[in-house]
Image (cartoon, helix red, strand yellow):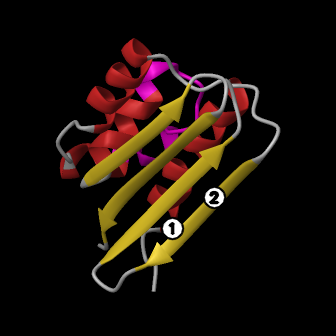
Amino acid sequence: MIRDYGKVQGIVCELIANSVQARAKKIEATIEDLGTELRIEVKDDGTGMNPAQLEAAQARLALPRRHEIQDYYGGLAGGGAGGTGLALVGMMTDRSEVHSVPGQGTAVVVYRVKD
């Protein structure tokens, strides 16, 4: 059962906003309850990322989870603040994976321990 809907919604909205910005024609979002954590995946067929963009995205998503920031900023993810949105997603999740191929699209998977 998902109790922190607002935070999960902010995460999904930010990841989908990034897919739209990458001119994706097809976007798939999945939220899976794994018991103690949630697995959130957004895949698209957008422009993809070159190696430097992929490295920057991975660095933003690798930020340590910040419990004290989550309640205040959780609703701000998806606000179109460029790299800031991915940084907020990184601070609201526990681990992440990013796979991208230029011209073919991107898949982002984040895991969040349930509140």
The stretch of residues the image draws in magenta is: 72-84
Say above or below: 36 vs 68.
below
Number of numbered discs visible in the structure rendering: 2
Q: Quadrant of residue 14?
A: top right
Instruction: Tell me if 99 is positioned left or right of 16 in this view.
Output: left
Instruction: Tell me if 68 is positioned left or right of 71 in this view.
Output: left
Query: Residue 63 at what x, y percent from top left?
Result: 22, 36
Confirm or deny contact between disc 2 and disc 1 (CB under 8 A): no
Numbered disc 2: secondary structure: strand
Query: Residue 23 at what x, y percent from top left?
Result: 76, 26
In this rendering, the label closer to the viewer, 2 or 1: 2
Q: Which residue is mark 2?
A: 29
Q: Is residue 25 magenta?
A: no
Decide which of 15, 46 is in the foreground and name it. Answer: 46
Q: Quadrant of residue 55?
A: top left
Amino acid at the residue labelled 1:
Tyr
Q: Earlier in the sequence, mark 2 or mark 1?
A: 1
Quadrant (top left/top right/bottom left/bottom right) for the N terminus: bottom left
Query: Residue 87 at what x, y percent from top left?
Result: 35, 31
Q: Which residue is mark 1?
A: 5
Decide which of 75, 55 is in the foreground and name it. Answer: 55
Q: Tag 2: Cα neighbours inside 10 Å, few (<14), some, or many (≥20)? A: some
- Residue furthest to the right in view is 25
Q: Is residue 83 magenta?
A: yes
Decide which of 52, 74 is in the foreground and name it. Answer: 52
Query: Which disc is residue 59 wearing?
Result: none
Rounded to the nearest whole Å, what is the CA distance between mark 2 and mark 1? 15 Å
Amino acid at the residue labelled 2:
Ala
Say above or below: 33 vs 55.
below
Instruction: Tell me if 43 is positioned left or right of 97 in this view.
Output: right
At a point 65% along the width and 35% down the height, the residue shown is: 19
